[in-house]
């Protein structure tokens, strides 16, 4: 008679070890009784219904929103009126859905100019379709838009040799602002005008008339579109800058001829400023010096 090994696993235990999906303890899991839907149903992915990070309220709210017909209000006020949960809990659940990509809310302008908030429900986060035609514009796709290139600085312009008078500064600004009347392509921004003004002042300081400056900037412009008119004007102000005017010696001050007056000492007539009361000889005698001859 064979001796029985009491430590040997039973047949049932061996079956459980070989098939980990089987359990010795029957817990009574869910059993589905499914009937095929033919109307009033929506397909919702298990990635939402079994999401591991969303709260139960967020999952339920996400399923509800995905089941709504297009155009149904889905704002906090409407959802609060529909469910017993308060506005605070519903707002928190909506933020959860936004964080995980199941919801997107955008403020857009309608064809009539009215600002509205559009709620976009995404049944598969990360996959976008073209929205149905509505009176709202499609959301801009900025994710793949290339970054704008930094604008190149304008070329340097000549600088005035001295502090320009306010009238000269205003004259240069008005000249630049009026260029668009000669060619609409020369419409300058306030920043471009501020950059070009010192160059125009440098021309005016060299005794060039405003008409000459205007002709130098507007003559023989390219027939094609000007990509950056301010850069062209800056180049012309530098490349065509005229030489400074020839040096002119300042005129000597005019000779002043004083009126005749009588000396208080000798009553002799002499020419001197009104402040002098004595002639040259009397002044020398009073100071004990010889008169200048």
Image (tube, helix red, strand yellow):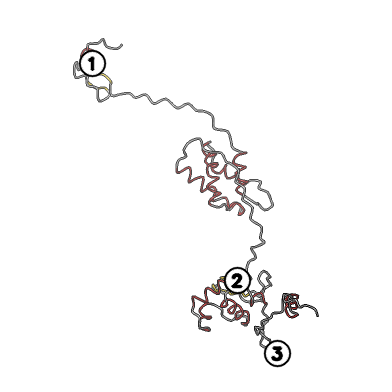
Q: Label 3 crowding class (10 Å Cα cut-off): few <14, some 14-19, many 20+?
A: few
Q: Which image quadrant for residue 280?
A: top left
Numbered disc in front, either 1 or 2: 2
In this rendered view, identify the residue nearer to me: 4 or 45. Answer: 4
| Residue 174 located left or right of residue 1 | left
Of helix, strand and loop, which one carries label 3?
loop
How far across and how far down the image is residue 185, in percent? 62, 53
- Label placed on residue 53: 2
Q: Which of marks 1 and 3 precedes in the sequence?
A: 3
Q: Which image quadrant for residue 30?
A: bottom right
Relative to 39, say whether 196 is above or below.
above
> What residue would you read off at disc 1?
283
Residue at image coords 67%, 83%: 26
Q: Residue furthest front?
A: 1
Relative to 262, say whether 124 is above or below.
below
> What residue would you read off at disc 3?
35
In this rendered view, identify the residue nearer to me: 27 or 39. Answer: 27
How far across and how far down the image is residue 49, in percent? 64, 78
Q: Marks 1/2: CA distance? A: 111 Å
Relative to 235, say whether 28 is above or below.
below
Q: Which of marks 3 and 2 precedes in the sequence?
A: 3
């Amino acid at each position: 008679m064979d001796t029985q090994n009491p430590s040997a696993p039973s047949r049932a235990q061996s079956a459980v070890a070989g098939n980990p999906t089987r359990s010795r303890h029957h817990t009574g899991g869910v059993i589905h009784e499914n009937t095929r839907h033919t109307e009033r149903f929506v397909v919702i992915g298990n990635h939402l219904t079994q999401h591991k990070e969303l709260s139960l309220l967020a999952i339920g709210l996400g399923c509800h929103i995905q089941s709504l017909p297009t155009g149904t209000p889905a704002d906090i006020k409407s959802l609060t009126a529909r469910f017993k949960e308060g506005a605070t809990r519903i707002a928190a659940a909506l933020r959860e859905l936004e964080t995980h990509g199941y919801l997107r809310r955008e403020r857009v302008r309608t064809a009539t100019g009215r600002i509205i908030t559009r709620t976009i429900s995404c049944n598969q986060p990360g996959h976008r379709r073209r929205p149905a035609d509505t009176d709202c514009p499609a959301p801009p796709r900025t994710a793949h838009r290339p970054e704008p290139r930094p604008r190149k600085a304008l070329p340097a312009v000549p600088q005035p040799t001295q502090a320009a008078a306010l009238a000269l500064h205003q004259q240069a600004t008005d000249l630049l602002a009026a260029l668009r009347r000669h060619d609409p392509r020369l419409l300058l921004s306030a920043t471009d005008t501020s950059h070009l003004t010192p160059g125009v002042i440098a021309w005016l300081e060299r005794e060039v008339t405003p008409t000459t400056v205007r002709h130098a900037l507007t003559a023989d412009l390219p027939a094609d579109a000007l990509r950056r008119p301010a850069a062209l004007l800056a180049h012309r102000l530098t490349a065509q800058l005229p030489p400074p005017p020839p040096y002119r010696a300042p005129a000597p001050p005019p000779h002043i001829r004083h009126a005749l007056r009588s000396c208080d000492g000798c009553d002799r007539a002499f020419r001197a400023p009104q402040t002098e009361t004595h002639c040259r000889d009397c002044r020398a005698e009073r100071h004990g010096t010889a008169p200048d001859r």
